Amino acid sequence: MRAFGIQQFLLPPPSAITAAFVEHFDELMTVGGNTLFEAIGGLVIGGVAALVVAFATARWVTASRALLPFAIAANSVPIIAFAPIMNNWFGILNPLSKMMVVAVLVFFPIMINTLRGLTFVDQASLELMRSYAASELAIFAKVRIPNALPYIFTAVKVSATLSLIGAIVAEYFGGSRSVLGQFIITEAAFFRFANAWAAIVVASAVSIAFFLIIVAIERVAIPWHASARIAESS
Amino acid sequence: MSDAVVRLRGVDKVFGTGADKTPALQKIDLEIPKGAFVSLIGPSGCGKSTLLRLIGDLTQPSTGIVEVNGKTAHRARLDRDYGMVFQAPVLFDWRTVQGNVELPLEVSAKNGSARADRAKAMLALVELTGFERRYPWQLSGGMQQRVAIARALSIEPAILLMDEPFGALDEMTRERLNLELLRIWQQTGTTIVFVTHSIPEAVFLSTHVAVMSARPGRIIELIPVDLPQPRNDLTREDERYFGFITRVRERLRGHEMGRPGAAEVAAS
């Protein structure tokens, strides 16, 4: 970077970022942890809501008519427009305000994927269950839910990275000092770009770690799925 | 016949309504005696599968009556009198072989240990002992279809409905599974209704071959195949076996009356 003559405050050299990382290690871990907590909280809230709506929608046609338009409307709200209002509703310092932004952000991908998994079932499987005079409940438990699991995991993997983006964006609109978004804004405001970059590196690392944790859970939960099989044979 | 397991009287099946009305089956009268092995054969789209699904109460007749074991087909399904085998094995990837065979027993709320024993016995019957803990996707197509047969038999169905079960398999596997199916049929005494495209397969397996016409499907003739039991590889070289094949083929062709599709049907 020195070779290209880029000025230090625009893009600090890796050595400066590393130095900032070491110097502020404890603080970065704290702010990273706080943001991860918001991201996980939001993912849980949004994910549970999404699963409930998806199950109701798959089970009852009336529920699908009643709920789907709202879900689509909620999805079309730009999340940045939402963040200040959530701060207002749940308190600017309350992590719940950030979680709600994340929840709204992850709700739709999880809901729509789960719904697809529950309804996109091989017709022959359903006929087979009907030939055993299986109840709707048994069909749900033994066919629809296992069928939906790979779809749910795909959605949660996408949502893991989304949830960190949502949490940090929400933090830009104000909040406790010790979160990634506020840390980055403050350090950048004081031209301490090496510190800001160190925080960005932490944000990426946290995001990757979150993603990998969900991949690990997926491997354990659905070892039968094709994605795990390929890994096994290679 | 008083001991008929399946009895269809004046059954019509029409798909769609209004201008889109398509008659699929017309005036089907059929009686299947207990312990029989009946094949349904006919040109593509003649309604063989629909007829099978009518017997299994997976679809309902437009007119007419379907009785199974002296009950309505619906009642028979609720009583779990059916075992179904489709062209695709339709096994669940998330269950082991054992788990797949136990599925119908779980649905009918059989208790755990009896369930496991029954599944093991059925897997032994289809010669898959030792594969209990494997997953379906670790098995070959022929083995998967044998798991499907074990699963269908696990609830001791009064009647086994098979919809082109070996249609997707290679010729050698198909011939081997034909022999196995006959052995299972003889050991269990189950009544079997079998849909197939293959004339030799129908003749080799069946006690009766129901020859069907093109749409709307009707049963042209129910041909009793009185080749000696038990049948084996020698049956396939028996002169009378070829006689029956020719007879079924001529019935199919005769009814087609030289329509373009006739040659294909005869060749299949």
Image (cartoon, coloured by chain):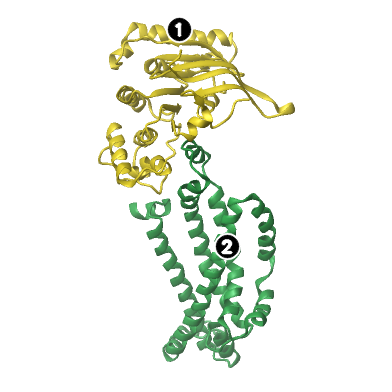
**Do the residues indicated by labels 1 and 2 lie within the same chain of the protein?**
no
Q: In this view, does A105 lie to the left or right of B243?
A: right
Q: Where is residue B265 in the image (x, y as percent from the top left)?
A: 51, 16
SS label for mark 2: helix
Q: In this view, does A150 lie to the left or right of A77?
A: left
Identify the chain drawn in yellow: B
Answer whether residue B177 is visible to the viewer in this image: yes
Specify the amino acid type for callout 1.
Arg
At 60% from the left edge and 25% from the top edge, which residue is drawn?
Answer: B61
Viewer-nearest residue: B64 or B205: B64
> In the current view of this chain or complex, which residue is farthest to the left?
B130
Residue under numbered circle 2: A50
In the rendered image, the vertical position of residue A21 relative to residue B149, given as above or below: below
Q: In this view, does B132 lie to the left or right of B254?
A: left
- What number is the disc on residue B102? none
User: Mark 1, residues whose alpha carbon is within 10 Å: few (<14), some, or many (≥20)?
Assistant: some
What shade does chain A have? green
> In the current view of this chain or complex, which residue is farthest to the right?
B19
At 48% from the left edge and 41% from the top edge, which residue is drawn?
Answer: A134
User: Mark 2, residues whose alpha carbon is within 10 Å: few (<14), some, or many (≥20)?
Assistant: many
Specify the amino acid type for callout 2.
Ala
In the rendered image, the vertical position of residue A86 relative to residue B60, given as above or below: below
